[in-house]
Image: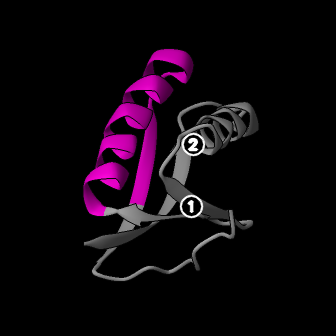
Amino acid sequence: MQLSVELSMYPFNGDYLPPIKGFIDWLNEQPGIRLQTVATCTIITGDYDRVMDVLRDGFKVSMEEHGKAVFVAKFLPGFAALPEQDA
């Protein structure tokens, strides 16, 4: 089953851009998902289990590297918000 997640990050840090950029850079390194980043959120699409694994691991990495942050997410199960990429 496909899953799409619209994710926004709000670091508990006055210098909020480096943690957000670091998290997005980390997401871009993860295989098996598709991403689109816009000014207010990042959309993640892929197989349900893979997307959930990436989110779990990403939240942990983010906290370990940048400290506390609030993540706001919208989950759309069974929907691929982003088209398949050509290989």
Which stretch did the figure color magenta? 48-72
Residue 66 lies left or right of residue 5; in this view the side is right
Q: Nearer the viewer, residue 60 or 12?
A: 60
Q: Is 22 in front, or is 17?
A: 22
Residue 35 left/right relative to 63: right
Q: Is 71 colored magenta in this rendering?
A: yes
The N terminus, quarter of image: bottom left
Cα distance between the residues tagged 1 and 2: 9 Å
Circle 1: element type: strand
State which tag comes first along the sequence, 1 or 2: 2
Q: Residue at x 38, y 45 (%)?
A: 55
Q: Which mark is residue 27?
A: 2
Type of secondary structure dominating the magenta stretch: helix
The residue lying at 67 percent from left, 32 percent from top is 22
Position of residue 60 measured from the top left corner of the image (x, y, whole percent): 37, 27
Neighbourhood count class around disc 1 (C-alpha, 10 Å): few under 14, some 14–19, many 20 upward: many
The residue that appears at 43% across and 50% down in the rendered structure is 71
Instruction: Check disc 1 and report the residue beneath it.
Output: 34
Three-letter residue code for mark 1: Arg
Give left or right: position of 47 versus 86.
Answer: left
The amino acid marked with disc number 2 is Leu
Q: Identify the colour scheme used.
A: one colour
